[in-house]
Structures are given as structure tokens and as C-alpha cells.
Image (cartoon, helix red, strand yellow):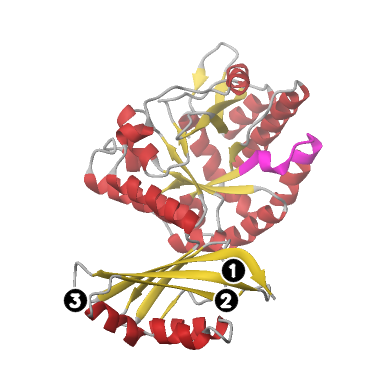
Amino acid sequence: MNGFIISDILTAMQRKELTVYYQPKVDATTNCLKSAEALVRWIRKDGSVVLPGQFLPAMEQTGAVTMLDWYVVEKVCAFLERLQKEGVKVRPVSVNFSRWHLHEEDMPKRLADIVDAHHLDHSLIVVEITESAMIHEENLMRKMVAALHEKGFEFSIDDFGSGLSSLSMVADTLPDEIKIDRSLLKKNCEDERERIILESIFLFATRLNIRTVAEGVETKEQLGFLRTCNCNLIQGFYFARPMPEDAFRECLVNRCQHNEEDILEIQSEAAAVQLLLQAVCMRYPLIIYGNLTRNSFYMMTYENFTSRGCPSTGTVDDLITHGTMSMHPEDRERWNAMFCRENQLRLFREGKKELHMITRQIGDDGVYRRVETSNYFVKSPASDDVLVISLCNNFADGEE
């Protein structure tokens, strides 16, 4: 147990030798303080410091770490309550919870009671659990996360990508945040494979509306790359080391803003594509990728489109049929004649590059709205398949 027994650590807690430090998480683009992680430090009366790695493993092995986790929650909530009374604008703080808490049926309720006792909003405490703790306790994890969300708490997966990643777990638990493990930055974001893996993680997280945090950022090169691939938050020595309460309070007051170079000066090609896609989606809330040759399609849809009942994937023929049924009766024949797969292939063979049409489509609310559909024919670079990209936009005016 690295020279310590559990009784020594519990005694240190009673003597208040275990202190909470805070490491800021800053916005990857603006460099402003957005949140923080609570980290425990054992500072003895003589001033000597015992590192977490020297006592946390012993507590984790026995399950005694749960007492330490609740101790940290109490300290964090008391600190945030004092700040609020002083008029300081507080930020959310992530608190690490061990896998042992998955067996505490009343964990979400107990957490809510502590936060409520300190008159804090539940959104100020983020429950952080390591990825490895989730792998072997999937059912308990799903149950606990659902209960946490029901009580208004956010959930974060720590050490994501450390070797045990389960994308199905991400899909099932719907985390609010994933923290990219520092091991994925070990080559300083200069290795092509490392960059591709990171870009893929940030891409799927963005599509799922999951906040991303890159931890262990220590160099300008790492920051430069992460800022260009849609990473939301940065945590690491490059900006700030873990700090005691007084120093963190100063960061909150001063917003902990740093000045860095213009993000466009270090833009990567992959990041530019992502930004372009975001801009296109602002204009066209419905984008469809179709393969006319193989009769298949894939859809990207967003909240502000008139109807969300359309299938997200399937055959182009079925998609046209579905679209025909949702059209105003006076528009159906014209729509089907123009956008049926046979006609689109014919237009492509005749050298057409695009086609446009405005129709009236019924929305989920039962109101007909004008919808502009623009199809652009493109040639697959990898085969002879004829591809089509459909950009759809609904107008604000309606017709009963």
C-alpha cells in the first residue's frame, strides 16, 4: 500500500490535511476559464506533500476511496457556496467518482442532498468516472447515469481512449462530456496517425453534441492542433497547474484569459472541412448523401428542419416515395417526376450538374411549408458510382 494504511489516510481526512486543488479547463478558442477539475492533495502539518499516486491506489483497492470522494464533494460545494456569497461568478467543477459508487444505490440522491444543502445549482457539479470503471459495470453505469441526468447533474467519461474505449457505452449512457486521455497526445500531435485518431474522436463527439476536453496539454504544438479540430476545452500545464482555493478564486475573478495566436494561422485541412460543414449546416438543416448507382442514401438532419420523420438511411427509391407522400398533393407528380432515381441518372448522363425545386412539404406540426431542394451530382473518386448531394432548406412561411 505504498507505505500507507487506510487508517493513516482517514486520520489525515479528520485533520483536514487532504486539500482540494482546482485545475482550470479553458475554452480552446477564447482561452477563457469555463470549468475546473477538483484534485485532492495530501499536505501534512510539516508542509510535506504526499502525491495522490501514493495513497489513492490503496483506497481504491479496498473501496475506502468512496469516503474520500464524498469528502471532496463536500469541500468543493462548501467552496463554491462561499464564492457565491462573495458575489464571485462560479463555474462547474468536475469531481472524480470511483467505480465503487456504482454499487451505491442512493448515490445520485446523496449527491443531490449535499449540493442542495449548499444552495448550489446541480449543473455546477459534474460527475467524472474513468472509462475503465465503466467497462465491467455497464448495466449499473447506465442506471446511475440515468438517475444523475434525472436530477440535473452532468456526467463525464474520464481517460477516454486509454485503451478500453467502448463506443456502445458512449451511445447508451449519453455522456455530457468526454475527456481525451493524455496518452493520445504523447507524440505531441505531430504524428499523422495520432492526429487522425484525435480528429475522428472530435468529429463523432461533435455530431453527438458531446463536450470534449483534452487533458494533459503541455505544449504549443498540442494546443495548436486541438484548437483546429473542434476540441471544446483544454486542461493541462500549458495553461495552468492544479492550484489551491485562493489562486483558483483569483482565476475566476480575472476569467483566466490568455492571449494566443490567431486560430486561422494554425488551421489544418481537416479542421477547415469541419468548419465548412458547420457553415453549410447553418444554411441547410437537411443534407442527404445519395448513391444513385447503388440506390442508397445517408442523411444528416438538424433540429430546425420542418420534418424529422424521414428515415436516416435506406434506398433512394424509398426516400423519394417518402418525400412524395409528405408533399402537398398539387406538388407530388412534379416532385416524383423530377427526383425519381431514373430521371436523376438520365440528367447526369446528359451532362447536368444540378437540379433545384421548391415544393410544399407538411411538417411534424401539420403545417405545409415551402421547401427548397437542391441536388448536386458528383462522381465518386473511388468507383464509377454516381453520387448526389441534396441540400434542403425550409422557409418560415406556412400554409394551412
Q: Height in image: 368 above or below 125?
A: below
Q: CA distance from mark 3 to mark 2?
A: 33 Å
The kind of residue tagged 2 is Gln
The kind of residue tagged 1 is Thr
- The question of residue 121 being in magenta is answered with yes
Q: Choose between 234 and 292: the one closer to the eye.
A: 292
Q: Nearer the viewer, mark 1 or mark 3?
A: 1
Q: Answer whether labels 2 and 1 touch (C-beta < 8 Å).
A: yes
Sequence-earlier tag: 3 or 2: 2
Secondary structure of the residue carrying numbered label 1: loop
Sequence-earlier tag: 1 or 3: 1
Sequence-earlier tag: 2 or 1: 1
Q: CA distance from mark 2 to mark 1?
A: 8 Å
Magenta-colored span: 115-126
Report which residue position mark 3 lands on. 384
Secondary structure of the residue carrying numbered label 3: loop
The reply to whether residue 64 is visible in this rendering is: no
Q: Answer whether labels 1 and 3 touch (C-beta < 8 Å).
A: no
Secondary structure of the residue carrying numbered label 2: strand
Q: Residue at x 38, y 76 (%)?
A: 297
